[in-house]
Amino acid sequence: MAKNQTRAMQFGFAAVLLWSTVATAFKLSLAHMSPAQLLLYASLTSATLLAAIVLVQKRGQQVVRQWRGQPLQYIKSGLLNPFLYYLALFGAYDRLPAQQAQALNYTWAILLSLLAVPMLGQKLRRWDVLAAVAAYFGVVVIATGGNLASLDFASPLGVGLALLSTLLWSLYWIVNTKDQGDPVASLLLSFLVSLPCIALVCAWRGELALPSWQGLAGAAYVGLFEMGLTFVLWLTAMRTAERTAPLSNLVFLGPFLSLFFIAQILGEAIAPATLYGLGLIVAGLLIQQFGPKWQQRNATN
């Protein structure tokens, strides 16, 4: 694919913009269906989209080869994401205000760097520790609504599920460091593994009935723009970019754009504690990304 930085930034911004709308879509959809139902119908939408992309690009045999080559890899991957990850994430959104759930979810990159130490043998840097301290202090601020003295959590289960989702997402990325296959084919295989598990959960809970059209519309939106099309846009951006650093920096727009949609569409009043906590989380992400570069620059001067 020909390199074009302007085109890459356009694809990247489109992906970040779409991702920033999904917290709002989660809450709107969960008003009409359970977390398991939302996951089932969103996954069906995403799997259909990914299968269509694979067929149009005539890569069906690639999917079969990847599955035959390492089926256990895709079983682990599919169980982690979308199955367990989105059950936890949607459960968190079902119990928390959207502004809290989306902010807590952004700590996954911090946790990933910590898990990479024991699981991938990477070295723990002081920047990772500083980033974790800042980010998880932000988590406490958000979870307590800024009431740090009492440590009174409005929904301990909701906060726990949000943080569990970051663990599952981090484990998914660690598991996928061993996957050398085509990313779209790999994602499709993960969805195909996950779908029977999701259907069993819905059947066990008596939730296989069709929800309202509003719920189905929301699930289709989530399947397209959280799980499917947006991933392809981001992948295209990364492959087209001449430099990935400016592209990666677009991600920092996401949480603030998301708060804008949450306030405007859901009508949630954004609490000061959410802004302070999110600021600490983003500060942690900035420390993690730019701290080593700043140290290296100073060392060479």
Image: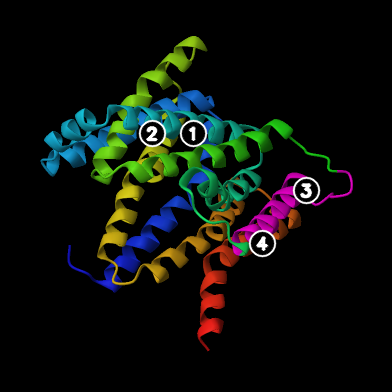
Provide the secondary structure element on which disc 2 rests: helix
- Residue 181 quadrant: top left
- Name the residue rendered at 33%, 71% in the picture: 243
Q: Earlier in the sequence, mark 1 or mark 2?
A: 2
Question: Left or right: 54 with respect to 172?
Answer: left
136 or 82: nearer the viewer: 136
Q: Main secondary structure of the magenta part?
A: helix
Amino acid type, residue under disc 2 in the picture = Ser
Q: Earlier in the sequence, mark 3 or mark 1?
A: 1
The span from disc 4 to disc 2 (Cα, nearest Å) is 30 Å
The span from disc 4 to disc 1 (Cα, nearest Å) is 28 Å
Front of the two marks 1 and 2: 2
Q: Which residue is mark 3?
A: 145
The segment highlighted magenta reads 127-150
Q: Which residue is mark 2?
A: 77
In this rendering, the answer to whether 281 lies above or below 299 is above
**Residue 208 in the image, given as x and y percentages of width and height:** 43, 15
